[in-house]
Image (cartoon, rainbow, N blue to C red):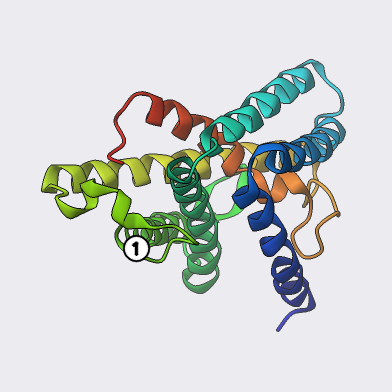
Amino acid sequence: MKQETIKRILSSIILIPIALFFMIKGSFYFAFFLITIFLIASQEWFKMSKKKMYSYLGIIFLFFSLYSAFLLRGDNDSDLVRFFFVIIICVATDIGGYVFGKIFRGPKLIKISPNKTYAGMIGSYFLAIIFGYYYFFSDFIFLFDFSRFEILDNISFRDQQKLFIIIFLISSVSQTGDLIISYFKRVKKIKNTGKILPGHGGFLDRVDGIIFAVPFAYLLFKSNLFIF
């Protein structure tokens, strides 16, 4: 196993419980967590964008995205279930793209991100759908009682189709966000946006898909198209 992969695994073992703590606690704790991410990600973005005019647009978008995350997290269990649903889809999208891309390789997807392949894109959708459906229909939701969501007892085929579309859309936006950040890294000719996370790079490297998917999902939920 490569040293970089070992670093990635070890840092994930440390980072995941910390992130979960702040997400589950919510309120002030989650706000503090988001502010920390905002400050670090903003510094990485300024460095990567060379402080050009669009640098400030990026900062505005980061603020909007993380504020959307705070609103999406809300202050009750139902909000947290929805928030984790989005995060799980984004993480599954990222893992699926990485694993399938490494295993199957194949034709490149786009020039701005030479490591992205069609196999990785398919893997992203595949894992996002598997994880999204499993999360939605199983009882394995951290500390929560899914029995309160009566819709699960009588979910129609049409609602299942809607769920599929929502997972597909969130995964698509997450992949698009990944490609956008990859484009700016390619312009800057750097591999990672930073070095703060061993094996992962910078904060922007880890949340590139999430910062695009979260505001999209928040607006989607506000439209009342979501089924729980």
Give the residue drawn at x 80%, y 47%.
190
Q: Quadrant of the N terminus?
A: bottom right
Give the residue drawn at x 66%, y 38%.
27
Q: Nearest the camera: 193 or 152?
A: 152
109 up-or-down from 107: above or below? above
Q: Quadrant of the C terminus?
A: top left
Q: Nearest the camera: 122 or 226?
A: 226
Give the residue drawn at x 37%, y 55%.
132
Give the residue drawn at x 72%, y 59%.
18
Can you name the residue that lies furthest to the bottom here? Answer: 1
The x, y position of residue 38, in whole percent, is 76, 35
Can you name the residue that lies furthest to the top here? Answer: 53
Q: Nearest the camera: 80 or 136?
A: 80
Q: Amino acid at mark 1?
A: Tyr
Q: Quadrant of residue 139?
A: bottom left
Which residue, given by chain and number where applicable, does mark 1 sit on?
134
Q: Nearest the camera: 89 or 31?
A: 31
> Is residue 179 in view from this perspective?
no
Asked if residue 217 lies left or right of residue 180, the reply is left
The x, y position of residue 174, in whole percent, is 51, 43
Asked if residue 147 lies left or right of residue 81, the reply is left
Total numbered badges shown on the rendered structure: 1
Helix, strand or loop for disc 1: helix
